[in-house]
Image (cartoon, grey):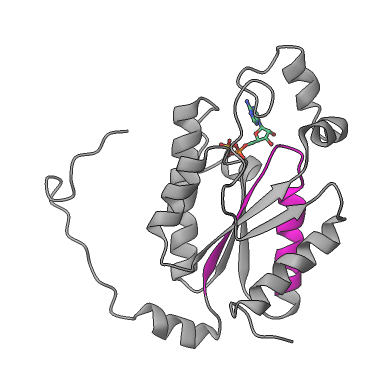
Amino acid sequence: VKLSSATDRNLTWHAHTVTRDERERLAHQRGCTLWFTGLSGSGKSTVANGVEDRLWQRGVRAYVLDGDNVRHGLNADLGFSPEDRKENIRRIGEVAKLFADASVVAITAFISPYQEDRDQVRSIHRKGDFIEVYVNCPLEECENRDPKGLYKKARAGQIPEFTGISDRYDAPAQPELELRTDLLVPEEAADQVVAYLEEHGYIPKL
Ligand code: ADX
C-alpha cells in the first residue's frame, strides 16, 4: 500500500490531552512491547502466554497478540508473500505501539522473519519501549516438533515460501533477549523474560 502524505490527505495530528506519563501513573505500570520472533514451532506463543500469565499474577496488565489469531481478524486479508509479511508486521507493530502507549505490556508472537521489518517496528517505538526477544530453537528441532504438521507439508512442496524451508529467517542481530527454547522448558523461558523486565525496571521487583 502506497499512501500519500498526511498533509495531502488533509490529516492533522491531534495531541492527546492526557499524556502518556499521566496514563502510566493512573495504571501504576509502564507500557512496552515485548516482540517475540522465531521460527514456526519455536515456542513463541507458549512462552508469550506464560509471560502474560506471570504478569497477570503480579497484577500487571499485558496482552498477547498472536500470529495465528491476528491473521483471522485484523490481517485476514494477508498471506505469506514477502510483501504481505511486511504489511502483517507493520500493522502489528502499530497496534503494539498503541497498546504500549496505553500503558499495557504488549506481547507479540509472530515469526516476523525479516530484520528490516522488525527494525521498522522498533523505529516507531519510543527508545526503550521495544524489547526484541529471539526465540531461538534450531530448525531441526522445530521440524521434529512440527506441532501443526506444517513442516511436513512444506517439505512435500505443499506450502510455498515456508519460513526456514523455502523462505528466509533473519536471526536477530542484536536482540535484547535470547531464549534457547530447545534447552529450556517454556516455564524457564517465561521466567527469564519476567526477570529481564524486573532487572530493567519495566515492572516492580517482587
Ligand atoms: S509472519 O512471517 O508474517 O510473521 P505469522 O507469525 O503471522 O508469520 O504466521 C505464522 C503462522 O502461519 C505459522 O506458525 C503457521 O502456522 C502459519 N503459516 C502458514 N503458511 C506459512 C508460511 N508459508 N510460512 C510460515 N508460516 C506459515
Judge left or right: residue 51 versus residue 2: right
Q: Splitting the image into 4 quarters, where does residue 124 fall?
A: bottom left
Which residue lies at the image location 77% right of the left edge and 43% below the top edge? 137
Q: Is residue 95 magenta?
A: no
Residue 77 seen in the current view: no
Q: Is residue 61 left or right of residue 90?
A: right
Q: Position of residue 202 (x, y in %)?
A: 59, 77
* Above or below, 103 relative to 49: below
Q: Is residue 197 visible?
A: yes
**Magenta part of the protein: which range?**
31-55
Image quadrant holding the N terminus, namely top left
Whether residue 124 sits left or right of residue 37 in the image: it is left
Residue depicted at x 18% and y 50%: 6
For this rendering, which residue is in front, 148 or 44? 44
Q: Ligand 1 lies in which image quarter?
A: top right
Which of these two is toward me, 127 or 79? Answer: 127
Is 42 magenta? The answer is: yes
Residue 101 position within the rendered picture, expressed as x and y whole percent measured from the top left: 44, 69
Residue 168 picture location, percent across and down: 59, 28
Q: Position of residue 178 (x, y in %)?
A: 69, 55
- Which quarter of the figure is the C terminus placed in? bottom right
The residue lying furthest to the front in this view is: 173
